[in-house]
Image (cartoon, helix red, strand yellow):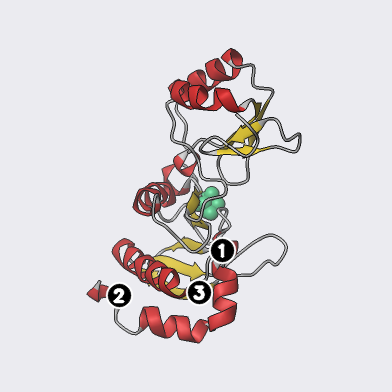
Amino acid sequence: MSSEEAPKGAILQRDKQTYAIVPRVPCGLLTKEKLRNLATVVDKYDIPIVKLTSGHRIALVGMKADAINDIYADLGMDPGKATELCLHYVQACPGTEVCKFGIQDSLGFGIRLEALLAGRDMPAKLKVGVSGCPFSCAEGLVRDIGIMGKKKGWTVSFGGNSGQRARIGDILAEEISHEEVITLINRCLDYYAEHGKKKERTARFIERIGIETFREAVLSRPLSEG
Ligand code: SF4
């Protein structure tokens, strides 16, 4: 297989000969079975580098192209998205599941959101951060969609980005319920899908159209109307 024929879900590395993959790990949750299997696969294929990424993912690096499909089959995990225009990950902190500061169940909500958003086409890659309290460990304000738990509900931001042209997301709503968050996210992503340019991240999209135009589009009707 030539370097132009990158296997599905694999990223060509600097050496132009080997590939990396980032199998999906929804919200970063692993089980002992998955960890054991991962170690077995790393051993079997002699994978030289295993690296945790900033987005709750496990990167396996340095494999030949013709081994990728077998590795995924042995892992029993879905290919992670690394370059496609869609959801790349939902980052979620432990929240009330284990953290003593947790106010809301960020982990449970993150898993629900990952299932809701996975596979949905977007103008550009999309990253989501869900935090269980205002300490905001899941870094939602610098993610395309940020969700932060407070006593009376969730705060939602849109248009954040880290990286070279970092941008703090704009707060769209505060103290809203789970269902209202989902309604708001659906409205945001529908509008973004319709008006965003190809490869235009939410931060650049909001800068181009203006946050007031966006607010008017997604918040002109009460969230309780669905
Ligand atoms: S954001 Fe809050 S609940 Fe989540 S890990 Fe940080 S301190 Fe804990």
Marks 1 and 2, the one that precedes in the sequence: 1
> Of the numbered discs in the image, which one, if any, rests on residue 223?
2
Q: Quadrant of residue 176?
A: bottom left
Q: Position of residue 64 (x, y in %)?
A: 63, 25
Q: Image check: 165 left or right of 188?
A: right
For the residue labelled by badge 2, is the local secondary structure a helix, a strand or a loop?
helix
Residue positioned 70% across, 37% down in the render:
13
Q: Is there any visible trace of residue 79 in the rendered image?
A: yes
* Residue designated by label 3: 171
Identity of the amino acid at label 1?
Answer: Lys
204 up-or-down from 73: above or below? below
Residue nearer the viewer, 84 or 36 = 84
Q: Image check: 33 left or right of 204?
A: left
- Quarter of the image with the N terminus in it: top right
- Quarter of the image with the C terminus in it: bottom left
Q: Position of residue 98 (x, y in %)?
A: 46, 41
Disc 1/disc 2 C-alpha distance (Å): 28 Å
For label 1, being within 8 Å of ligand 1 is answered no
Marks 2 and 3, the one that precedes in the sequence: 3
For the residue labelled by badge 3, is the local secondary structure a helix, a strand or a loop?
strand
Judged by depth in the image, the label closer to the viewer, 1 or 2, is: 1
Residue nearer the viewer, 20 or 94 = 20
Q: Is there any visible trace of residue 101 in the rendered image?
A: no
* Residue designated by label 1: 199
Marks 1 and 3, the one that precedes in the sequence: 3
Disc 2/disc 3 C-alpha distance (Å): 15 Å
